Image: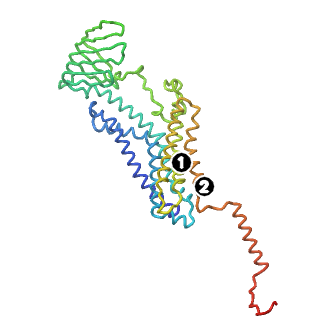
């Protein structure tokens, strides 16, 4: 890599790191604001809050990293033109394609990072996030419920206690479960205790009543008990106890060879194909964005010429192709035959950028035919000069030749 390429690579890499950290911080703040309920109404500590918000970021890297590279490339090329460095390069005979070497190397590194996140880090983070969510739901009864407060672990499920004893017992417990409209159940107990056995947690209630109202019965059913236990893991309403991972939470080899008995695969096989090919196609946007920026901003312009159109146009066109890719990914979930279009979006963006860059190329390299003709003409001129050397003509006598 020449000195000029190394200089552009350093400038673009520095801008990329800064912009990537900034965008990641903005995304983390957005996720943190959405999960702030973990610390307010669900009483989780700071460490678990930071873990859950941080684990949600890798799934967004396929969108964040190419956008960061796009902004960094626009910034670097705009500054090179503002400092007249692109003008000096063009005057020295350096075409716009020379910029593809440092920016293309940076795009290769970004694409490798996106692929690593898509195939390794992302599924791992999603599975860890699911495990933390289960822990939050399990610890909710033991840590979050406060005396004289109505707490809702999830919609249509309300828990209230009168007090909590020093030993951890829940005094004056009331739990109202209206998630199933066909059967609304209310538990009333003098005391309650959280018991953990292995990976399962139970809420044991002593000396109380169960008030059950069925959909077709006018009068409720009242059942008295001395001791009754409820599985806390069943607070999340679900049809079975088997943990079903979503396609985003699965590794690539599981997407390539899905389990035929997987309920998600049975109901929506296109979601597996869409997730797999989205992981494979998303790194291509790094190259596509670099070529789009090169098409709009690779040519040198005078400092008096406004580059606002080039900056805005390059950014809008690149983002538009990315939005189209997201739409095609969602479309492929319902129509798996549209999977090849996931590769067509970045491919079309890269092709358009390359064609426009070549069309606007200056200084333009002569074609092979033109170079051949010029070489033949120069050879012919040298041959004629050898055969008929130019002789120095002496002074012509005045008056002769009449």
Question: In this view of the protein, which residue sits in the foreground, 35 or 55?
Answer: 35
Q: Position of residue 66 (x, y in %)?
A: 47, 46
Could you tell whether 196 is left or right of 148 in the image?
A: right
The residue where tag 1 is placed is: 288
Q: Which mark is in front, 2 or 1?
A: 2
In the image, is residue 348 above or below residue 226? below
Comes first in the chain, label 2 or label 1: 1
Q: Quadrant of residue 56?
A: top left
Image quarter where the C terminus lies is bottom right
* Marks 2 and 1 close (CB-CB < 8 Å): no
Task: Name the residue beneath numbered marker 2.
Answer: 359
Quarter-of-image position of residue 218:
top left
* Nearest the eye: 247 or 385: 385
Tag 2: Cα neighbours inside 10 Å, few (<14), some, or many (≥20)? few
Q: Position of residue 75 (x, y in %)?
A: 44, 55
Instruction: Tell me which residue sits at (33%, 38%) in the image.
Output: 32
């Amino acid at each position: 890599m020449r000195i000029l390429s190394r200089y552009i690579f350093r400038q673009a890499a520095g801008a990329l790191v800064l912009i990537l950290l900034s965008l990641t911080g903005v995304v983390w703040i957005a996720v943190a604001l959405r999960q702030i309920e973990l610390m307010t109404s669900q009483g989780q500590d700071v460490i678990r809050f930071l873990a859950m918000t941080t684990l949600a970021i890798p799934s967004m890297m396929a969108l964040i990293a190419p956008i960061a590279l796009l902004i960094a490339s626009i910034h670097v090329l705009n500054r090179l033109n503002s400092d007249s460095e692109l003008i000096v390069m063009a005057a020295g005979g350096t075409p716009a394609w020379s910029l593809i070497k440092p920016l293309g190397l940076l795009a290769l590194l970004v694409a490798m990072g996106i692929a690593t996140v898509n195939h390794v880090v992302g599924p791992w983070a999603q599975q860890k996030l699911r495990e933390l969510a289960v822990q939050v739901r399990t610890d909710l009864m033991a840590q979050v419920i406060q005396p004289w407060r109505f707490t809702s672990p999830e919609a249509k499920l309300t828990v209230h206690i009168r007090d909590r004893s020093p030993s951890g017992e829940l005094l004056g417990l009331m739990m109202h479960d209206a998630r199933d409209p066909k059967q609304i159940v209310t538990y009333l107990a003098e005391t309650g205790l959280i018991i953990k056995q292995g990976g399962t947690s139970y809420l044991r209630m002593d000396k109380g009543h169960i008030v059950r109202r069925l959909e077709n019965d006018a009068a409720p059913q009242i059942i008295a008990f001395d001791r009754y236990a409820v599985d806390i893991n069943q607070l999340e309403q679900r049809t079975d106890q088997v943990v079903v991972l979503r396609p985003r939470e699965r590794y690539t080899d599981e997407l390539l060879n899905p389990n035929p008995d997987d309920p998600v695969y049975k109901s929506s096989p296109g979601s597996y194909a869409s997730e797999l090919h989205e992981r494979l196609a998303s790194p291509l946007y790094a190259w596509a964005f670099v070529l789009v920026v090169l098409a709009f901003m690779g040519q040198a312009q005078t400092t008096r010429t406004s580059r606002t159109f080039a900056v805005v146009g390059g950014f809008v066109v690149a983002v538009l192709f990315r939005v189209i890719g997201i739409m095609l990914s969602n479309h492929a979930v319902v129509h798996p035959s549209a999977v090849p279009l996931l590769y067509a979006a970045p491919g079309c963006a890269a092709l358009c950028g390359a064609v426009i860059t070549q069309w606007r190329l200056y200084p333009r390299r002569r074609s092979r035919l033109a170079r051949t003709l010029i070489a033949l003409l120069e050879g012919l001129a040298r041959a004629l000069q050898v055969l008929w050397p130019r002789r120095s003509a002496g002074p012509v006598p005045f008056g002769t030749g009449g």
